[in-house]
Image: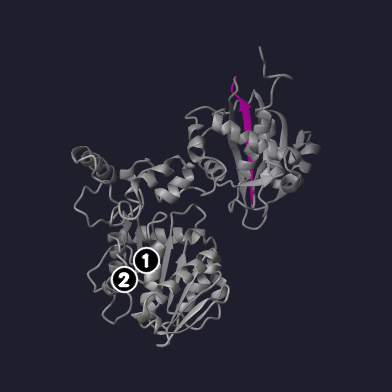
């Protein structure tokens, strides 16, 4: 369920169509303006808001807030009758360069000068980001004599910068969430680029320092994430549940495009600064960038992996609606295990009679502790007997123990460690050319789109098993079978003349 205050059509496709109709009817010079209200947000309320004080404070600093920023302050800073924040956690998702950093810095200044917030802490995944924000805040203070006179001292300690006020209020930045442990009673915590926080420890170390605070608030900001954005995804799920009727005092505001369509009308949902500080031509110029980057940075839409080695659209174009492996045809099998030995996959491949070939995820194994090599070998042997296989490809580093159990049973095995970089390159080439075909299996899709490229040697690449932040044995096994499915059938397959 999507909440909306607008009287425009509630269906996103209708809204885009209406925008297009307007663009035809209005003069050609009529600009496309970013939407001031988020596309997805938790239920609003009629409580009073201290955000109006922040909006007036920004005017005193000669800062002209955009409509979407005013919406944020008004609804993020609602207060209960007892004066406590209505929303102890506020999450904002918006595309790049929309002004969320400026908005966060204004809120920090408000905490120092307007609110009784003894200690505020800001943390970003990258220390350089936090430091740049700190330096900008100091510059804003120094440019205003009234603000500067209220500062007691400023510390420039790398990774622990701090502003101390004469009224006792403080603001500091911390390098990473875990470094906040031991900090005495912070009142407000800011987390920037939450999509990059993939573990609970860092979030918990900051979130639970607020338990003894009188009026705590966690303010998070981020671009769209991927399947590994653990904290951001959990907050988004809470927002969806709240819109479905669940009781939750967390607030969630998401400016995102309703579809993947690359149009200004669609992008306007994710870029509230469009027509204010973002010129339409600048936005249009990004539409030829890598698709996953456009989805997260420009359209604010979730992807499987932000830096996936495999283009999502190219992989989708390789899907087959029907077909299967033929037990009578020559088949290549490959098996791989994840580094933690909790996940394993067996993949098969066959040629389709031309340059194309079909891959299928045949079996997966999971164990929360550790997989049993013997059990995997016994299951894999069933597929070796079912299909007319040439051999089973494997990596000695991950699945050597399984392969060692297959060989005494008369099953031919082939160690692929030396050929792994080449097989990854061959798989990417086969996907981009459409020669690789797959059966659109969900588990295989997820693993392939979770792969991350790592450089290997002079220009080579591999799919990083650990760097991918997800178990990808099916993707690795697909690369291994691709090596044989793309193997030339004659000594020469390129003819000149």
Point 42% across, 82% down: residue: 213
- Along the line of sight, the residue nearer the viewer: 179 or 28: 28
Q: Residue furthest top?
A: 497
Q: Is residue 339 above or below residue 204?
A: above
**Residue 175 position within the rendered picture, expressed as x and y whole percent measured from the top left:** 56, 70
The residue labelled by disc 2 is 58
- Along the line of sight, the residue nearer the viewer: 216 or 70: 70
Magenta stretch holds residue 482? no
Point 66% across, 43% down: residue: 462
Q: Is residue 215 above or below residue 479?
A: below
The residue labelled by disc 1 is 103
Question: Which secondary structure lies at badge 1?
Answer: helix
- Residue 258 visible in the current orientation: no
Magenta segment: 343-353
Q: Earlier in the sequence, mark 2 or mark 1?
A: 2
Quarter of the rendering containing residue 443: top right
């Amino acid at each position: 369920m999507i909440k909306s205050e607008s009287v425009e059509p509630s269906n996103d496709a209708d809204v885009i169509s209406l925008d297009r109709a307007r663009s035809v009817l209005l003069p050609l010079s009529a600009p496309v303006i970013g939407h001031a209200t988020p596309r997805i947000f938790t239920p609003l309320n009629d409580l009073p808001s201290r955000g109006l004080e922040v909006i007036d404070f920004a005017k005193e600093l000669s800062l002209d807030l955009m409509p979407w920023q005013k919406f944020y302050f008004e609804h993020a800073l609602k207060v209960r009758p007892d004066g406590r924040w209505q929303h102890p956690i506020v999450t904002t998702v918006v595309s790049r360069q929309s002004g969320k950093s400026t908005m966060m810095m204004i809120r920090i200044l408000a905490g120092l000068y307007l609110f009784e917030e003894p200690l505020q802490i800001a943390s970003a995944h990258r220390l350089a980001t936090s430091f740049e924000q700190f330096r900008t805040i100091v510059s804003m203070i120094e440019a205003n004599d009234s603000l500067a006179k209220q500062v007691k001292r400023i510390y420039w300690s790398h990774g622990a910068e701090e502003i101390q006020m004469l009224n006792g209020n403080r603001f500091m930045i911390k390098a990473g969430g875990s470094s906040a442990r031991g900090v005495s009673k912070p009142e407000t915590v800011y987390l920037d680029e939450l999509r990059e926080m993939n573990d609970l420890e860092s979030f918990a170390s900051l979130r639970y320092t607020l338990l003894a605070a009188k009026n705590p608030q966690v303010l998070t900001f981020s671009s769209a994430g991927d399947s590994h954005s653990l904290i951001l995804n959990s907050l988004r799920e809470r927002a969806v549940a709240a819109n479905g009727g669940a009781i939750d005092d967390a607030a969630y505001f998401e400016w995102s495009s309703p579809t993947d369509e690359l149009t200004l009308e669609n992008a306007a949902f994710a870029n509230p600064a469009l027509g204010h500080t973002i010129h339409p031509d600048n936005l249009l110029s990004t539409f030829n960038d890598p698709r996953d980057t456009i989805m997260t940075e420009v359209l604010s839409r979730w992807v499987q992996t932000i830096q996936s080695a495999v283009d999502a659209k190219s992989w989708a174009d390789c899907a087959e609606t029907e077909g299967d492996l033929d037990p009578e045809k020559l088949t290549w099998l490959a098996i791989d295990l994840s580094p933690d030995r909790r996940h394993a996959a067996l993949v098969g491949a066959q040629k389709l009679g031309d340059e194309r070939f079909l891959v299928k995820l045949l079996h997966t194994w999971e164990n929360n502790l550790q997989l049993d090599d013997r059990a995997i070998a016994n299951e894999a042997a069933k597929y070796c007997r079912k299909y007319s296989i040439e051999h089973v490809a494997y990596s000695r580093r991950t699945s050597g123990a399984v392969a060692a159990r297959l060989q005494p049973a008369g099953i031919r095995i082939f160690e692929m460690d030396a050929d792994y970089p080449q097989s990854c390159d061959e798989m990417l080439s086969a996907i981009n050319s459409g020669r690789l075909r797959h059966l659109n299996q969900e588990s295989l899709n997820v693993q392939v789109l979770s792969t991350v490229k790592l450089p290997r040697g002079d220009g080579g690449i591999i799919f990083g098993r650990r760097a991918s932040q997800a178990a990808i044995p099916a993707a690795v096994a697909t690369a291994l079978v691709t090596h044989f499915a793309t193997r030339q059938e004659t000594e020469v397959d390129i003819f000149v003349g």
